[in-house]
Amino acid sequence: MDGKMREMEEKMVKMEEKIKTLRIENSVLKENPRVTNNVNIKISRLVVQEHAKEHFVPLTNTVLKRSLTVRPDLRLLIDGAAPVAKLILQTSLAGRDKVACTDLSRSIGLWKEIDSTIVVDPRLCKLMPRLCRPIYSGYKHVWEEGAEANGMEFEDFQKATTVLGKLGKIAQNVDKGSRFYNEIVKLISIANCDLTYMVEEGEEGEEGEEGEEHEHDEDGISIDYMSSDED
């Protein structure tokens, strides 16, 4: 009986996590009207990269530190990865010409480096530490002031402390695969998966069709260069 109860409890936890994820995704979609989950426009590598070269803002440290324009509210961290992703989207990645998600199913992002190099970044492994570093630094500073200075109950302060620790691991580039990491990446990818604004009428699917050898990124991952429909 104990074994069955434990199994049922584990299933309930998984269901609750799935429901939470769906609610978060729905929230992000509502706040980003141009994003749709059924976008499946094949766009050639040339179109995406040339658009990025011409229009994307280089992601310098100055651009990414925009997340610290107001005093961090430690209570934001209580709810985990979702508010962190939302903060990144509303500050350092605000505006469509920052990151393009060229494959939603694998969270492949494309962005411009300071030297105008276009980076193809599976699961945003190269960008995520830079996105999280200024946020972690600011929140760590107010965390050091303690629970009372932040107007928080000790229990909530402890929850925020746990999330801050997870954020710190990403900022220090030692976490590239936790559930916390993946949830942030997925929400950023969803918000940047609509690439239709890059394509002028008549340019869709013109290049890279039949007979073209499949391209791989520097990590050996096959690149489809499309915004996928939902997982």
Image (tube, helix red, strand yellow):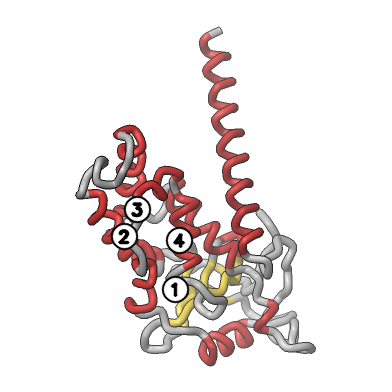
Residue name at image x 31 percent, y 37 percent: 158
Q: Label 3 to label 4, Cα distance in Å? A: 13 Å
- Of labels 4 and 2, earlier in sequence is 4
Secondary structure found at label 3: helix
The residue that disc 4 covers is 87
- Of labels 1 and 3, earlier in sequence is 3
The residue that disc 2 covers is 171
Q: Label 4 to label 2, Cα distance in Å? A: 15 Å
Secondary structure found at label 2: helix
Secondary structure found at label 4: helix
Residue 126 appearing in the image: no
Q: Dividing the image into 4 quarters, which one contains the C terminus?
A: bottom right
Extreme residue in the top direction: 1
The residue that disc 3 covers is 167
**Contact, CB < 8 Å: mark 3 with mark 4?**
no
Residue 124 appearing in the image: yes
- Mark 2 Cα within 10 Å, few/some/many (few <14, many 20+)? many
Q: Is residue 48 left or right of residue 149?
A: right
Q: Label 1 to label 3, Cα distance in Å? A: 26 Å
Q: Label 1 to label 4, Cα distance in Å? A: 29 Å
The residue that disc 1 covers is 218
Of circles 4 and 2, the one toward us is 4
User: How far across and how far down the image is residue 185, in percent?
Assistant: 49, 59
Residue name at image x 73 percent, y 73 percent: 41
Query: Of the residues shown, which amino acid type is indicated by label 3?
Result: Leu
